[in-house]
Image: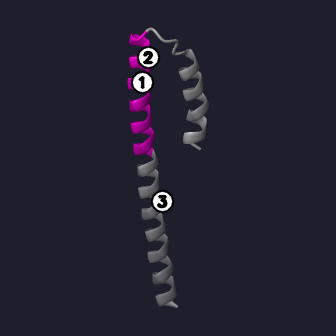
Amino acid sequence: MAFKKRQAEEEFISERKEAAKALALKDQEGRQFYSYAEKCLKEWSEQGKNVKPLILELKNKQGKLFQ
């Protein structure tokens, strides 16, 4: 019985570590995406392009990225 309990605890800890790693990776990807998006907005703005459609698309994607 003690073996099964210990094994279940180890499995739970392992699953939590994997979940934390996945969350950290998703956060990092989100930061990289928005950093790139900022650069694009700045570049488009400097070129005199209309950035409003890009901003609207980013707002739309934001909800999908962080679900």
Which residue is under mark 3? Answer: 19
Give the CA distance from mark 1 to mark 3: 32 Å
Across and down, in percent, residue 49 comes to 48, 12
Residue 23 drawn above or below residue 16: above
Question: Was residue 12 drawn as part of the magenta stretch in this picture?
Answer: no
Which residue is under mark 1? Answer: 40
Which numbered disc, 2 or 3, marks the residue closer to the eye? 2
Element on which disc 3 rests = helix
Element on which disc 2 rests = helix
User: As rendered, which of 17 and 42 lies closer to the eye?
Assistant: 42
Residue at 55 percent across and 41 percent down: it is: 65
Residue at 42 percent across and 24 percent down: it is: 40
Residue 63 drawn above or below residue 27: above
Report if the CB atoms under discs 2 and 3 are less than 8 Å apart. no
Which residue is under mark 2? Answer: 44
Q: Which residues are magenta?
A: 27-47
Q: Main SS type for the magenta part?
A: helix
Report if the CB atoms under discs 2 and 1 are less than 8 Å apart. yes
Residue 32 drawn above or below residue 16: above
Identify which amino acid the numbered label 3 is placed on. Ala
